[in-house]
Amino acid sequence: MKLIHTADWHLGKTLHKLSLEDFQASFLDHLFELTRAEQPDAILLAGDVYDRAIPPTTSIHLLEDTLQRLTELTRVVVIPGNHDSAPRLGFGSKLFTERLRIVSETTAVGKPVVIASGDEVVNVYPVPYLEPDIARITLADEVDDEGVLTSLARSHQAVMEAALRRIDADLAVREGAGIAMIHAFIAGSATSDSERDISVGGSQSINPSVFQALGAETRASRGLSYVAAGHLHRPQQFETGGPIVRYSGSPLPFSFSEASDKKSTTIVNIEGTRVELEQVPVPQPYSLHQVRGTIEQLTSDVPEWATTGFAHVEVTDLTRPEHLHERIKAHYPNALLIRHTPPASKIEAVTPSVEKKSPEELSLEFFELALGRGVDAREAEIIEQAWATVLQEAK
């Protein structure tokens, strides 16, 4: 049995106002070719299909075209992430064929998509992103003395445990391997700047050990073989003592903090309960770079990638250089972010205690900091006259 695990496409995403749509279309072409070459039994798309709840129409058309192409080759199973609107992503899902399953309702948790290939059977359990305020009610599984359902604790840990208990109960009466699809933040994960915080009162994380116990004191089933995770954009995985829990990561970098990440798609090979993973690099249609230095350093020692790569440029001169943006753009035409960030230690060294200083004294210190020199006599006279006028008009 062979599966392709992908996540976090974020269709409609922009990077500092730069549209990524053409680059995302390039990745989807790559995924189609990979699917045609590998001939997997299914593709698992673990959430954040779109970048926002109401995506651009061009992104909707791009997804529609992609799913049509992929389902001609294999089955596709999709869950919404925290960026998606679950009802919108799942609209019409009851009309879809078995080739496309979009599971967007928490009431469906514990009902597997069964995939068979020869003698192999895999039970894929889609778990859409669980918003604790909603899922703590819809996944409640305990009753009080009067037989009334008791809401779960308001945490991602509690609702994920409840979802896994449902999976455990179903898997216990089925043959074949068990795989869960989730969209969540697992404690100890490496994050990047492009993920949206999903914390609820500081309780956003899920302990990785929960996937071994499946949310129960005594597990009823043989346990999961693999957890296909979405939400975090850096590829990474956990060895839990039970199933392998892996984030496939986003196919493209969506922040400068991901500049050095190795983006890939995960191929999951399953034989019985044994799982082997292969990482297929995603061709990157653009590159991100961060560079820092004085204006002289940045414009005299220009790297080779400067004319093509997207850059975050930090200029560290103590005072802001004249025509800063124009000078940087002349050497880094694709700079998306240009910031003047003088050394903090030098700024702190000249930061005065302002409580007991006159407006004239504060003005002189401001201009000294801004100009990188002391003001001359004529400039000091202008400052003094300006303050005298202000104080006179304030009376």
Image: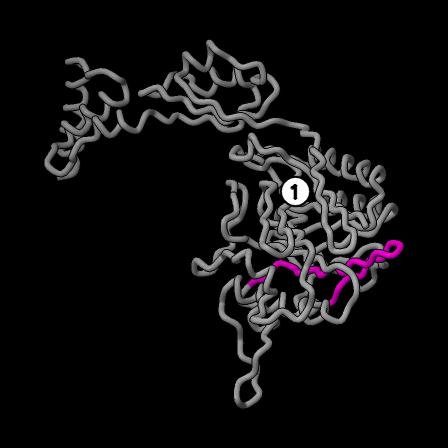
Closer to the camera in the image, 307 or 202: 202
The crowd level at tag 1 (other Cα within 10 Å; few <14, some 14-19, many 20+) is: many
- Which residue lies at the image location 43% right of the left edge and 19% below the top edge? 324
The percent position of residue 299, horizontal first and vertical second, equals 46, 12
Determine the residue located farthest toward the top in the rendered image.
Answer: 300
Against 392, is 10 above or below?
Answer: below
- Which residue lies at the image location 70% right of the left edge and 30% below the top edge? 283
Magenta residues, start to end: 111-131
The percent position of residue 107, horizontal first and vertical second, equals 68, 70
Closer to the camera in the image, 28 or 42: 42
Determine the residue located farthest toward the left in the rendered image.
Answer: 356
> Residue 381's quadrant in the figure?
top left
Quadrant in which the C terminus appears: top left
Instruction: Label 1: state its secondary structure.
Output: loop
Give the amino acid at mark 1: Gly
- Which residue lies at the image location 56% right of the left edge and 17% below the top edge? 306
Is residue 171 left or right of 296 when viewed as pictured?
right
Is residue 62 left or right of 246 when viewed as pictured?
right
Q: Is residue 112 magenta?
A: yes
Is residue 367 left or right of 108 when viewed as pictured?
left
The percent position of residue 89, horizontal first and vertical second, equals 70, 56
Against 301, is 15 above or below?
Answer: below
Q: Write down the residue under mark 1.
A: 12
What is the basis of the colouring in this image? one colour
The percent position of residue 329, horizontal first and vertical second, equals 52, 18
Q: Is residue 325 magenta?
A: no
Against 1, is 173 above or below?
Answer: below
> Residue 380's quadrant in the figure?
top left
Against 50, is 157 above or below?
Answer: below
User: In this figure, what is the number of numbered marks?
Assistant: 1
Closer to the camera in the image, 267 or 240: 240
